[in-house]
Image: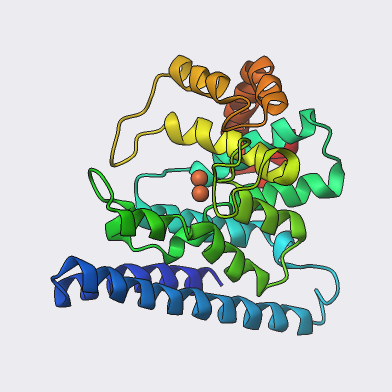
Amino acid sequence: MFIHAALGVAGIALSDLVLVALVHDPEPLILALIIKDTLVVLGGGLLLRWWMRRERRSPVQADQTGPRDNVPMLRVLVSLMELSHKDTGDHGERVMCMAEGLARLAGVPGEALHDLKIGALLHDIGKLAIPEAVLRKQGTLNPQEVALIRQHPQFGRDLLEQANFPRVVLDIVYGHHERWDGSGYPLGLRGDQTPLAARVVSIVDAWDALGSDRGYRTEWPQARVLDYLRDGAGSQFDPGLVALFLANFDALKASWEQSREVDSRASLLTVCAA
Ligand SMILES: [Fe+2]
Ligand SMILES: [Fe+2]
């Protein structure tokens, strides 16, 4: 599966380069990339479905595991995606561990906590279907490019739905860009219409994205990021969850940093649960 994932990422990058080399006008290029990436999502979904069927037929693992249980495979998949996008680093893993800590504080119990972690790890998986030229573009995106990036929650949910991921995982992948005041996307849900797991990931996702270098801007100082979250409570973010995050920020961050030290010796789930 790791080889399939690596070949998949290489194929996406290569096909982007070929299209960029062949089509020079921006509008036809974006259209060609959208068509190509829609086919990639469908193909990826079929591959995941085939892999799940094969796993279910395995005499050793039959009826015992699902895609959410194969955490190493999911980690590799996300790492390969982040490698191909170059500027997001360990975004998925940081979001997973910090979201797990915040969700635990919010009272999310055992099995749901596991699914929340998987959803947090995979929250941006739909970006596999966004052309690298758009994701890594320096400067302002045009309206078409913004619209395309805003489709990544839909692309991600379409992909994971085909492999029977649990509801919580799909909720996070689809809902992590909704906003508390209803001005988010893709549905414009308000308040607790957005599932709790997605509201948790939304806060941690913003914290990590703003505190990291991206192609279009340098990282913000930590104090500025925390001010942004504080100011966004009640508009962008669930105010109760922001208060919980800020009140426990030092402990959550320390837990994440400690997890990185032992990461090479323990499974990720053990690390994040510590
Ligand atoms: Fe996202
Ligand atoms: Fe993200």
- What residue appears at the point 49 percent right and 59 percent down from the top-left corner? 152
Q: Position of residue 168 (x, y in %)?
A: 74, 54
The part of the image, by quadrant, that contains residue 230 is top right
Say if residue 17 shows up in the picture: no
Q: Is residue 58 above or below residue 221?
A: below
Q: Is residue 249 above or below residue 60?
A: above
Q: Nearer the viewer, residue 218 or 94?
A: 218
- What residue appears at the point 55 percent right and 25 percent down from the top-left corner? 232
Q: How is the image coloured?
A: rainbow
Say if residue 8 shows up in the picture: yes
Quarter of the picture containing the N terminus is bottom right
Left or right of 113, for residue 203:
left
Q: Position of residue 221 (x, y in %)?
A: 40, 19
Quarter of the picture containing the C terminus is top right
- What residue appears at the point 41 percent right and 56 percent down from the top-left corner? 149
Q: Is residue 241 above or below residue 227?
A: below
Q: Nearer the viewer, residue 224 or 240?
A: 240
- Tally the numbered discs: 0
The part of the image, by quadrant, that contains residue 138 is top left
- What residue appears at the point 67 percent right and 25 percent down from the top-left corner? 239
Q: Position of residue 45 (x, y in %)?
A: 57, 76
The part of the image, by quadrant, that contains residue 32 is bottom left
Left or right of 232, for residue 252:
right
Left or right of 132, for residue 74:
right
Q: Position of residue 74 (x, y in %)?
A: 60, 59
